[in-house]
Amino acid sequence: MIDIQRSPSSKLENTNFDNLLFGKVFTDHMMECDYIDGEWQKPVIKPYGPLSLDPSARVFHYGQAVFEGMKAYKDKDDRIWLFRPDENFKRINRSGKRMAIPEFPKEYFFEGLEELLKLDKDWIKKGFGNSLYIRPFVIATEAGVSASAANEYKFMIICSPAQAYYSGEVRVKFSEKFSRAADGGVGFAKAAGNYGAQFYPTDLANEEGFQQIIWTDANTHEYLEEAGTMNIFFRIGDKLVTAPISDRILDGVTRKSVITLAEEYNIDLEVRRVSVQEIVEAAEKGELKEMFGSGTATVINPIVGFGHKGKKFDLPKLEDSYAKFFKDKLMKIQYNEAEDKFGWRYEVK
Amino acid sequence: MIDIQRSPSSKLENTNFDNLLFGKVFTDHMMECDYIDGEWQKPVIKPYGPLSLDPSARVFHYGQAVFEGMKAYKDKDDRIWLFRPDENFKRINRSGKRMAIPEFPKEYFFEGLEELLKLDKDWIKKGFGNSLYIRPFVIATEAGVSASAANEYKFMIICSPAQAYYSGEVRVKFSEKFSRAADGGVGFAKAAGNYGAQFYPTDLANEEGFQQIIWTDANTHEYLEEAGTMNIFFRIGDKLVTAPISDRILDGVTRKSVITLAEEYNIDLEVRRVSVQEIVEAAEKGELKEMFGSGTATVINPIVGFGHKGKKFDLPKLEDSYAKFFKDKLMKIQYNEAEDKFGWRYEVK
Ligand SMILES: Cc1ncc(COP(=O)(O)O)c(C=O)c1O
Ligand SMILES: Cc1ncc(COP(=O)(O)O)c(C=O)c1O
C-alpha cells in the first residue's frame, strides 16, 4: 500500500552514536503523505532529504502546523517497541482539528510509521536509555498568503536517534509575566506556534540561571500549569499533585501513565489546581520534597530547584525519589523488561 | 550592496490583472537574506522560486516565524509610493524580538525593498485601489528539532499584485469561547502561529453566517479587541471608540493613522476598553451607527452586522459613514492625491 523508495546509501556508518545532540541527526528515510484535492494521497517512504516549498506556503506565514513526539525502543532480543502510539495518533488529529488541518487516517499513520521503522531499524540502538525519537508532523503547504486554512498539506515522519542523556541540573522559574496559552486558545494542541512563543521568555529565564519555565495561568499567574515540553508533578510530603488538563495544557502521554502507575502502586496523587503560593509555602516549610517533569523526550526529569519573584529555592536530594521510581517503572515497560499490565507496549514487526 | 540576479523571463504578460485572488500570484523577483554565524548576510534579489529546506527546519516544528504586510501604490505620474514603511520595519523587529529572532538591519530592509520594487515596478498597476501587496517575513531555517531558538534564519520579501476588491458584506461574530491571545503572550506580534490558530474558530463562525470574528479578551470575553487581520472601530452616535493597544493586540498602522486623522478632522474618538454589553445595548437602542475594520489589505472595511450569543444585529446603511470618510482620506494620501501633512508617504525612486 505504501510506496517505498530505498536510499541508495546509508549515513549510519558515519554517525557517532556516542555523541548525539538531540534532534540533529536523522535516519536514512522519511515518510511523506500529501493532502491534495480534498484527500490524503498514498503515503511514500523515501530517502531523507530537503523539501521544496513555495515561499508563500501557508506554514511560513500562518503557522498552520502541528506535530507529535514519540519513541521507538529496542529490547535485548532486537524486538522493536513503541509506547502507547495510539495516544500520539489521536493527539495529532486533536491538535490538527484545532488548527483546521484535515484528519489523518489511522492506517496511513501506523503503516507508514511501522514500515519506516523497519527500514531504519539499525538506527535504533539497544541499551537502556537509547531510543529513536520519532517526529510526525503536518504542515500547510498550499502557496498563497490569504489568511485562511490551506487546501494542501504534507504529513511527514522523520526520525532521530537519541541517547540516554543527562541534561544537567534543571532549575525552573515560575512565570510571573509571560504566558504560554489563553483559555479558548490552542495550548492543548501541539501546534507549532506554541513552542516558538516560549523561546524568548525561556532565554530570559536562562540568563537568570533557570533552564526552563513553569507556565502559570495567563489570568492570574497564581496556578502552576506545565513546562515547555513536560507536564509537572509536585511532591508535598508523600502526596503528589499535578494540574488538571484544560484547553491550555497538553494532555501528556507520560503524565497520564504516571497517574495510572501511582494508582497501581498506591502512591497518593491528586489531580487538581496547584497554586504558586502553596508550593512556595511548602518549600519554605521543608515539605516540598520533589518536583519533576514528565515527557517523551526525557521520560521523567527531576527538578532541583525553582525561582519565584526573585527568591530561589532548592529541593532536597532524595534517595527514594518518586521521580526515580516512575522513571524506572516506565522505562522497564518501554524496553520490554517488565510486565505490561496496561497494554501500553506496541510491537513493530 | 545588494546582489541582484534578474529573472530571464517575466510572468507579467500571462497574468490577468482583472481577476486577481488575494496573495495568489507573485511577481518575478524576491528578496532573500540569510542569518548565519550570528550575522545577517548580504541580501540577494533573485527570481521568485521555491525554497529548499530540511524537513527538520525549526519553522515547520516550532512556528518561529514573523511577517509584515504593506503595500506599494502607483500614482498618475508613475511614481511609486509606500505608506509609513518605517512602522512596518519597526514592527517586524518588535515581533521578531518576542519570537527570539535576531533584529534585522534597517538598511537591508529598505534597500532590499526598494530595489525589489524598482525591478518589479511594472507589476504595480495604476488606478485607485490597485496596489502591490508586499510581504516581508522571517522564518527559522536551522535544521534540528530541539525546542530552542534557531541559529539560522531567512528574511524574505515577496510581492503580490492586489486589486481594489469588494469582499462582499462582512458580518462579524463576537467571540464567546475561543481566544486569539493571552496576556503575556504573543498577540501583539505578527507571529505566524497567531493566524493559523484563528482558522478553526473562523471556519465555525463562517458556518453560522459570519465572515470574521471579533476577538474578545480571553479572561472574560467581555471586551472587544480586534479581528483576525484588522483593528476595529465602533461608532456610537457620533463618537468613535476603539480598544487600546496591549500585549494581546496588534498595533495597526492603519488604526494609528485613523486616530491621527480623527483628531485632524475633529471627529470625536476615544481609545478605551469597549465592552460587548455596551455595543449590544447601543445596537438595541439604535445608537450603534457603524462598525469598521482597519488594516493594510482593505484599508477600511465596513461591517454590516454582528452576532452575539445567538442574536444577530444589523447596522444601518449610512450615506455619510466614517468608514467611507477615512477610507477616502487615507487612499488619497496613499496614492499621492492629497497633501501629506503627517509625512506618511515614502517615495521609491
Ligand atoms: C507542552 C508540552 N507539555 C507536555 C509534554 C509531554 O507530553 P508527552 O508525555 O506526551 O510527551 C509535551 C511533549 O510532548 C509538551 O510539548
Ligand atoms: C491581527 C491584526 N490586527 C490588525 C491588523 C491591521 O494592521 P495594519 O493596519 O498595520 O495593517 C493586522 C494586519 O496587519 C493584523 O494582522
Image (cartoon, coloured by chain):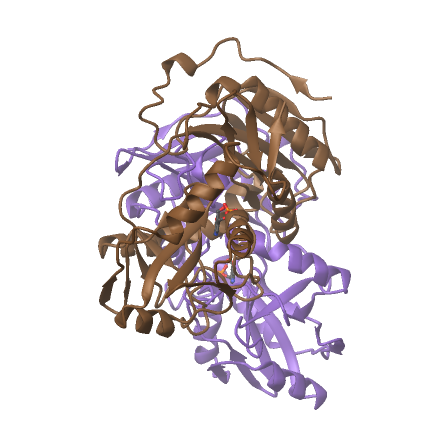
Chain colours: A purple, B brown
The residue shown at (66%, 44%) is A20
Task: Relative to A229, say whether B45 is above or below.
Answer: above
Out of B218 and A281, give the one closest to the viewer: B218
The answer to whether A199 is drawn above or below residue A27 in the figure is below
- Left or right: B177 in relation to A259: left
The vertical placement of B58 against A297, above or below, is: above
Number of numbered tags placed on the structure image: 0
Q: Where is residue B251 in the image (x, y as percent from the top left)?
A: 55, 54
Residue drawn at x 34%, y 51% as measured from the top left: B320
Q: Against A228, is A52 above or below?
A: above
- Which residue is pictured at 47% across the width and 21% down the height? B123
Find residue B207 and report its horizontal and vertical position in percent.
23, 54
- Horizontal and vertical percent position of residue B13: 39, 12
Q: Is residue A189 visible?
A: yes
Q: Nearer the viewer, residue B159 or B125?
A: B125
**The C terminus of chain A - image quarter:** top left
Q: Is residue A157 visible?
A: no
In which quadrant of the rendered view does residue A209 lie? Answer: bottom right
Image x and y of residue B77, in percent = 52, 20
* Quadrant (top left, top right, bottom left, bottom right) of the N terminus of chain A: top left
**Residue at the top extreme of this rendering:** B8
Q: Which of A26 and B335 is in front in this view?
A: B335
